[in-house]
Image: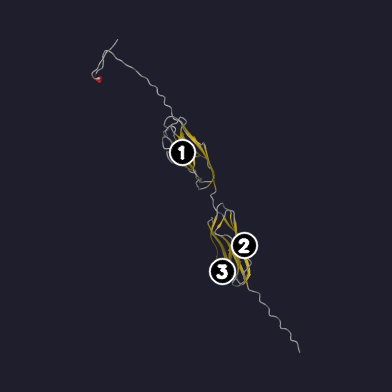
Amino acid sequence: MSVCFAPIWLERFVSKSAILSDVYTATYTITPPTASLSPSTLNFGDQPEGSTSAAQTLTLKNTGASTLAGIVISLSQTDIVRAHVSVTSSIDYGATTTCGSTLAAGATCTIAITFDPQSLGSLPGTVTVTDNASNSPQSASLTGTGTAAAAPIATLTPAKLAFNSTTGTASAAQTATLQNSGNAALSISAITLTGANPADFSQTNTCGSSLAAGATCTISVVFTPASAASFAATLSVADNSAGSPQTSALSGTGTAPRATSPSPPRPRHKP
């Protein structure tokens, strides 16, 4: 049957004698994005406790044909988890990122990781990216070791120096040794004589204002008693190490000069 219909206004007329219907079926295949996170491991090596490493970079890439969405980046360590969209941190690791919450097909963004150990020993971590990719989540492992913070360690030996000398006469010099056994330079602000009788002692030294890690210098002390008595003082080194100042106790005994016996009279010779 043939139906001929010529409407004046298309929207106002519907044929009651025939229903013409064309059904069109379209099939759309939606492919979810895929993502990659590289490299798979960042190794920060040894880092002094309380200091921050140089940043290392991870790259997130949308390798699919549609937008990567719902991006959440997290850092985790054992029982510690922090999750954010833009900037993330954990106890020992920190991060900044250019990623945002979406990433166009074929695009990349970066995640910069730093290591700031708050304790000693091996401190592993994980960076995890969750999103709408078919292979979500993407992850990378973090490794780093917290080491003792760089610091000087100063010791002054021996703990005591004892002298004997005649009043007004300088004794032989005795030596104290200042050692820096730490892993950072020792900054020396002063080497002084203090205590009850500092004026009866004097010192010279080879130390200067700084002592390198692992180095030693010497302090020579001389005792010159002003009288026949006992004297005491303290050799003190002020510096930037823990336990400053380092000290050695000085003691000295002054003795009177020996009295010279008068010469016996010379016998007279009779003429």
245 versus 90 height, above or below? below
Query: What's the residue at 48%, 38% (across, down)?
Result: 58
Frontmost residue, 213 versus 152 = 213
Where residue 175 is drawn, which disc sits there? 2
Q: Secondary structure at mark 2?
A: strand
Check contact, mark 3 vs mark 2: CB within 8 A: no
Frontmost residue, 184 versus 230 = 184
Q: CA distance from mark 1 to mark 2?
A: 59 Å
Query: What's the residue at 48%, 37% (across, down)?
Result: 59
Frontmost residue, 40 versus 81 = 40
Q: Quadrant of residue 100?
A: top left
Q: Mark 1 vs mark 2: which is more N-terminal? A: 1
Residue that carries the numbered disc 3 in the rendered image: 199
Viewport quadrant of the C terminus: bottom right
Residue 26 screen position, x and y as percent: 38, 21
Q: Nearer the viewer, mark 3 or mark 1?
A: 1
Say what amino acid the circle numbered 2 marks.
Thr
Q: Secondary structure at mark 1?
A: strand
Residue 46 screen position, x and y as percent: 55, 45
68 versus 50 height, above or below? above
Check contact, mark 3 vs mark 1: CB within 8 A: no
Q: Mark 3: give few (<14), some (14-19) or many (20+) Cα within 10 Å.
A: some
Say what amino acid the circle numbered 1 marks.
Thr
Where residue 110 is drawn, which disc sits there? 1
Q: Nearer the viewer, mark 1 or mark 2?
A: 1
24 versus 170 height, above or below? above
